[in-house]
Amino acid sequence: MRHFLLLLIGGALFASCNNAGSTKIDAPADTTANTTVAQQVNYPYTIDHPDYWDIGIQQNTLNALNALKAWENKNMDASLKYFADSVHLQFDGIDKMVSNDTLKAMLAPPVGSDPSVKMQDWESVISKDKKDEYVTLWYREYWKNAKGDKDSVDVINDLKMKDGKIIGLDEYQRKLH
């Protein structure tokens, strides 16, 4: 009887372990799939067009990066070919429409400054109604001042694009110590 009771308890334990083990465990979801599910989000602020942007055109990113690279290489003519004939500039203390000639004079690196750029990231976006396109660049800019001292600044450029040309440039800087 003792053997029978031991066998019964052992069988019950074995069966309970097997039942728990027989539960099907699904494989992890494929996180590489690019699926978006629209869900209602209750944001703490309201704006006219929430979640309004899609991934933009790669050619716009290339044009923005080529314009910056030409500037870094002190080739303003090559840089300006990526800009429209007139550009809306917004910097600290500046908010105006300028011609290509004025833009060239304003953006040309100072003689002897030897600028260089360490790119951190970029993103191209287009509005869902396809009316607005932007490329945003995040980078660190290095240069030498007139005394030969090295300095740097973190920069964010928001470049408004139209037909592959830069029509607006908003620049934000954070001076580094």
Image (spheres, rainbow, N blue to C red):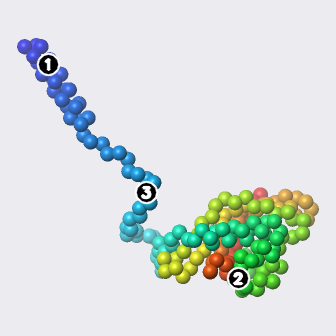
Upstream in sequence: badge 2 or badge 1: 1
Quarter of the image for residue 21 reads top left
Q: What's under tag 2, amino acid-wise?
A: Ala
Figure quadrant of the C terminus: bottom right
Q: Which of 143 and 67 is in front in this view?
A: 67
Separation (CA) of disc 3 from disc 1: 50 Å
- Front position in the image: 139 or 146: 139
Looking at the image, which residue sits at the far top? 2
- Find disc 1 in the rendering and name its residue: 7
Earlier-in-chain disc, 3 versus 1: 1
Instruction: State the residue at coordinates (50%, 71%).
Output: 54
Q: In which quarter of the image is the N terminus?
A: top left
7, above or below 142, in the image? above
Estimate how packed mark 3 is, as few (under 14), some (14 to 19) or many (20 or more) residues with alpha carbons within 10 Å: few
Find residue 18 and report its horizontal and vertical position in percent: 22, 31
Q: Which residue is tagged 3?
A: 33
Q: Quadrant of residue 119?
A: bottom right
Q: Judge depth for marks 3 and 1 and give the one in front.
A: 3
Q: How crowded is mark 2: few (under 14 residues within 10 Å), some or many (20 or more)?
A: some
Q: Give the image location of residue 98, x and y in percent.
A: 75, 85
In three-dimensional space, the C-alpha distance between marks 3 and 2, rounded to whole angstroms, equals 38 Å
For residue 161, side relative to residue 154 (left or right): left
Disc 2: which residue? 84
